[in-house]
Image (cartoon, helix red, strand yellow):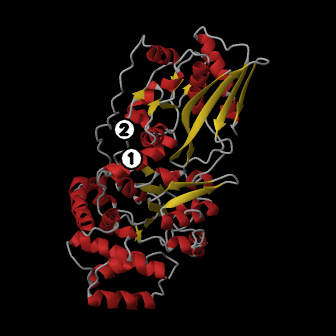
Amino acid sequence: MSIARIPSFAFSGIEAVPVEVQVQIAPGLPSFLVVGLPDKAVGEARERVRAALTAMGLALPPKRVIVNLAPADLLKEGSHFDLPIALGVLAAMEVLPSAEIAQFAALGELSLDGRLTPVAGVLPAAIAAVALDLGLICPGAQGGEAAWAGHIDIVAPDDLLSLINHFRGTQMLGPPAPAMPPAAIGGPDLAEVKGMESARRALEIAAVGGHNLLLIGPPGAGKSMLAARLPGLLPDLSPEEALEVSMIHSVAGMLEEGRLVMRPPYREPHHSASMAALTGGGQRARPGEVSLAHRGVLFLDELPEFPRPALEALRQPMEAGRTTVSRAAAHITYPARFQLVAAMNPCRCGHLGDASRECTRAPRCGEEYLNRISGPLLDRIDLTVMVQPVPPAELSRAPAGEGSAVVGARIAEARERMRARGGAPNVEAEPGAIALADDARTFAEHAAEKLRLSARGFTRILRVGRSIADLAGAARVRREHIAEALAFRHRVPGRP
């Protein structure tokens, strides 16, 4: 009787939880059992392992093969346990050296012909392996992804036979190089937006502080066009942010060719998206759009058309910067510090306020349409802009406005002032940390009382004022900065 032990990982959010794959080959009736709370994909690994060994000319011994995934009370999900199970079987058969294999964590899915196919979660697994002082064995296509974990011994074969030859000394697999991020590709330029000065100003303020933005206007007014240009105004992610965002995308299986995400992500789900699609969930509790947009922009077009429960589920992530998927067996938390940009028509027909085109139910149709969005959700919107259509003459004759490069440089300077204060980003700043001129403080207090702002609304006014002051290069928030912030906050038709 022999036992082999191979380290691997399960995933709880973006955290890689160590799992020991224990393989025992003992006398008894021929069988292949997988125990330790495996899901169906893990249970089916025995057939993939059996087929991969057969493709190499190997066969399981006619004995009792037991695979235990420890700890046994932790649910094991996913096909990435194929490779550690196969390695454990080969080590127990003495085809591979057990002591050397045990120094590596492994994950990967096996094809029936023995090839290794990519799996989700290689980057967080590599980072966890570094913390445990282990190497990592992963599919060859993901070696560049694992290499971003730092100083770690990585073996990235394309197939199981190459891996066996590597450990037996007949073939050497070199360490993979980190997959370099793609060259920056220019996105839509803000210079293409003509007119809309108020909307352009709100977009710039939102980009400085990471504030939430709501665009309201008739169809074709340019709301989606404005939102698509926001990512081009944002600076690159810091190394820490890039690693965190890339770990989320890795767990979701969306890290393209193992390259780190260096630019703020931009997500635009369809309005038919469910609550689980937005906030995370499903059978395997995958990250939702709010997490995939972490440190970036979540654009919700046709906001009132989203299911009401899905919109209400956004409220907690917008405040806490994280989302928790609750299950009977576990609670899985994903980061979700995103910037919400939403767009909507003023009513169902979209022409409220245009006497020649609005429907016969106006203005009641506009009130009913806006009422699909709850007050608490609107209270979390920092900037609201009414986008009016630009006349054709202005579209064809007006000169181009400032481009994304010019505006982006101004935003970068304002963000540098924000970082120089050593505090949190403006959207997360505590009210006590915001330096206010005396007249600005008095004005904000009176305005909040007159407009009956909530405590959240008052705080968000101060934060937006801080971003406007950063754009102006002012050390303290002045009265005019608060006035501009208030002008953008209360522009929702039909609401006080």
Q: Residue furthest front?
A: 1
Q: Position of residue 50 (x, y in %)?
A: 66, 18
Horizontal side of 125 relative to 446 (left or right) equals right
Badge 2 local density, few (<14 within 10 Å), some, or many (20+)? many
The residue tagged with tag 2: helix, strand or loop?
Answer: helix
**Residue 243 image label:** 1
Which mark is first along the chain, 2 or 1? 2
Place residue 109 in its image quadrant: top right
Of residues 91 and 312, the one nearer the viewer is 91
Q: Residue furthest right?
A: 29
Place residue 196 in its image quadrant: bottom left
Badge 1 local density, few (<14 within 10 Å), some, or many (20+)? some
Question: At x 42% / y 66%, what residue is drawn?
Answer: 213
Q: Residue furthest top?
A: 57
Horizontal side of 138 relative to 404 (left or right) equals right
Amino acid beneath label 1: Leu
Place residue 294 in its image quadrant: bottom left
Q: Which residue is mark 2?
A: 148
Amino acid beneath label 2: Trp
Q: Are marks 1 and 2 in contact (CB under 8 Å)?
A: yes
Question: At x 28% / y 73%, what residue is drawn?
Answer: 468
Residue 62 visible? The answer is yes
Q: Position of residue 256 (x, y in %)?
A: 43, 36
From what the image shows, is residue 424 above or below residue 39? below
The residue tagged with tag 1: helix, strand or loop?
Answer: helix
From what the image shows, is residue 301 above or below residue 30? below
**Residue 6 image label:** none
As measured in the structure, the alpha-carbon distance from the residue carrying label 1 to the one carrying label 2 is 9 Å
Q: Position of residue 314 (x, y in %)?
A: 55, 63
Horizontal side of 152 relative to 61 (left or right) equals left
